[in-house]
Image (cartoon, coloured by chain):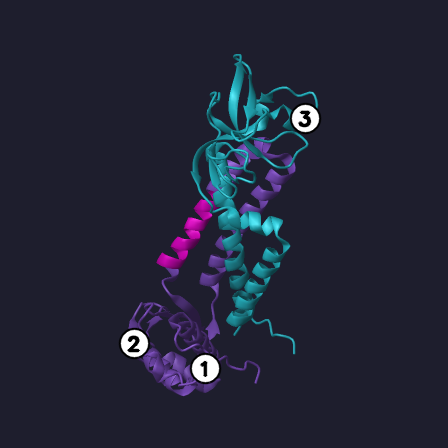
Chain colours: A cyan, B purple
Amino acid sequence: MLPQLSGVNIRQTLTQALSFCLVLTTTFMFWKGLSVVTNSPSPIVVVLSGSMEPAFQRGDILFLWNRDVRVKVGDIVVYNVKGRDIPIVHRVVRNHASSKKQLLLTKGDNNAMDDLDLYAHRQYYLDREQEVIGSVKAYVPWVGYVTILLSENVWAKYALLALMGFFQMMQRE
Amino acid sequence: MPNPKNKVNLSSVPDLKNATDDEIVQILASKGYTQNFSLIDVRLMLGFASVIVAAAAAGYDYYVGFEKAKPFTAIGVSLYFVLNLAFTAWIMYVEKGTFYQGHKDGKKISVSSSAKKYSPIYNLTVTETTTSSKSSKAAKPFNEFFDSTGYIVRSPLEKWIDGLISSVVQEDDSSAKAKKNS
């Protein structure tokens, strides 16, 4: 039988849809608000590699700040090289600054070599303004490991989906 | 039956309250009241306006990139939180638990309810809103209109709301006559 869409029913459906949308949009807008305040397109990142050990380990969550015009040698920055999708978290080891521009060389604490090989072809320095999306101001260990598990382990993804489906079924009237 | 009743989890006060609210709406409809949806419509409009703002901000940011969209993102974020605040304020200070507004024979009533989180008491208020705002409040434990398996029982609830309505809405001569004529 088709559900009757009376004035009450349609509003009930809309109310349910709205509460679902509000959960999504509130999370999203908090994220966007944070990115406007910190001036960083991605103000919270998860560490994906061990290249900054022992400072940061895989799964640590980092909070970024991108309002300082110049970064200092010794700062840990997150940068996006053009043509690569994954942001990299490494320490600044060298800088050349003029009034217009700042160029940086970075290196992972746990790496033997600096980052030249990670940059684009024939790129020798990072551009502070173009490529750095923030310097690390705070971190929380381990919390981000869930996202690593989900993105790298297919079974974890299925397990989470199954769990969500199960709870959804338990909640149904 | 068009609306088979749902079984309610008797341990969940919000579920009990929602089921009772829904039942009262149906009782009032069966008594010939016409529901006025303006409260919930404003709430839905405020809510969906904020969702649209968020969607627009997300879309613009996606298409032109973070740097270019930044000023608009900032405006969108502020607007979103203002609308959300208005939405919350509307629920807290305007609706105040009102889940039904309606009228019959030129008499308007407004019905609100509340229940504390861990207390099995249903607080019901019926207000006459035609001219005055005479209201009548009462509280009853849920077990007076739910059976032990979790199904709502209409007759005691109906009796209760009848009593509350008649205590605030007096049938004056004109409406009594109108009834006779029709």
Q: Residue at x 60, y 26 (%)?
A: A115
Can residue B7 be found in the magenta stretch? no
User: Which residue is labeled 3 in the image?
Assistant: A120
Q: Amino acid at mark 1?
A: Lys
Q: CA distance from mark 3 to mark 1?
A: 75 Å
| Residue B115 found in image quarter | bottom left
Q: Position of residue B82 (x, y in %)?
A: 44, 45
Q: Secondary structure at mark 3?
A: loop
The magenta span reads B79-93
Instruction: Name the quarter where the N terminus of chain A is drawn.
Output: bottom right
Residue A130 in view in this figure: yes
User: Which residue is labeled 1 in the image?
Assistant: B31
Q: CA distance from mark 2 to mark 3?
A: 72 Å
Subunit ID for the residue under disc 1: B
Q: Position of residue A96 (x, y in %)?
A: 54, 14
Identify the mark at residue B139; answer none if there is no mark: 2
Can residue B89 be found in the magenta stretch? yes
Q: Residue at x 52, y 63 (%)?
A: A16
